[in-house]
Image (cartoon, rainbow, N blue to C red):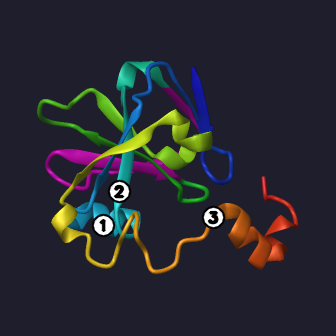
Amino acid sequence: MTEGRCLCGEVRVSVEGLSEEISACFCDMCRRAGGGLQMGIEAPAETVTITGPLKTHRSSRLAERAWCDTCGSPVWFRYVEGPDTGYLELSPGLFDHDGGATLKRIVYADRATGVHLKGAEIEMTSAQYEQEFLFLDEGETP
């Protein structure tokens, strides 16, 4: 069982059967909804339990997206028509260490203008960043 939560903790997620693969999408809709890209970890919907205040939006003829109605954290993307109906693509950020999943697939990669997952001009480890910005160590909000 893999457990996760949104930023504020109001939405809780439990998953039995979370994939080990993360997919990223740079299509126009995912870029708008995700702030540059959309990432997801697939799980069969019947293996996912979600509690808390969700909002959904039917973003296209084929799919809808959900987020926490309190803090706005993305929760899932799912197809409501077609061969992938019945699966959720859960946001990796819900889970500590991305639920153990790793990035395996990038779609619409040719539309990733300005966004680079590796090879950026500046790359800092979490330790380097937190050393430079010491105020980050002042405690975590719920």
Front-lying residue, 90 or 61: 90
Q: Is residue 31 magenta?
A: no
Q: Amino acid at mark 1?
A: Arg
Contact, mark 2 vs mark 1 (Cβ under 8 Å): yes
Q: Please name the residue shown 18% across and 54% down the image.
A: 60
Residue beneath the point at 60% across and 59% down = 71
Question: Residue 24, how many percent across, how many down?
Answer: 32, 52
From the viewer's perspective, is 61 left or right of 64? left
Of the two numbered discs 2 and 3 in the rendering, the one whose residue sits closer to the viewer: 3
Q: Which residue is mark 2?
A: 38
Q: Which residues are magenta?
A: 49-68
- State which quarter of the image contains the N terminus: top right
Drawn side of residue 41 relative to residue 129, left or right: left
Horizontal side, residue 94 vs residue 138: left or right: left
Any part of residue 113 in sight: yes
User: Judging from the image, what secondary structure is the residue with disc 3 in?
Assistant: loop
Up the image or down, 85 lies above or below 24; here it is above
Location of mark 3 (residue): 125
Spatial CA span between label 2 and label 3: 22 Å
Q: Classify residue 95 as left or right of residue 63.
A: right
Residue 112, picture quadrant = bottom left
Location of mark 1 (residue): 31
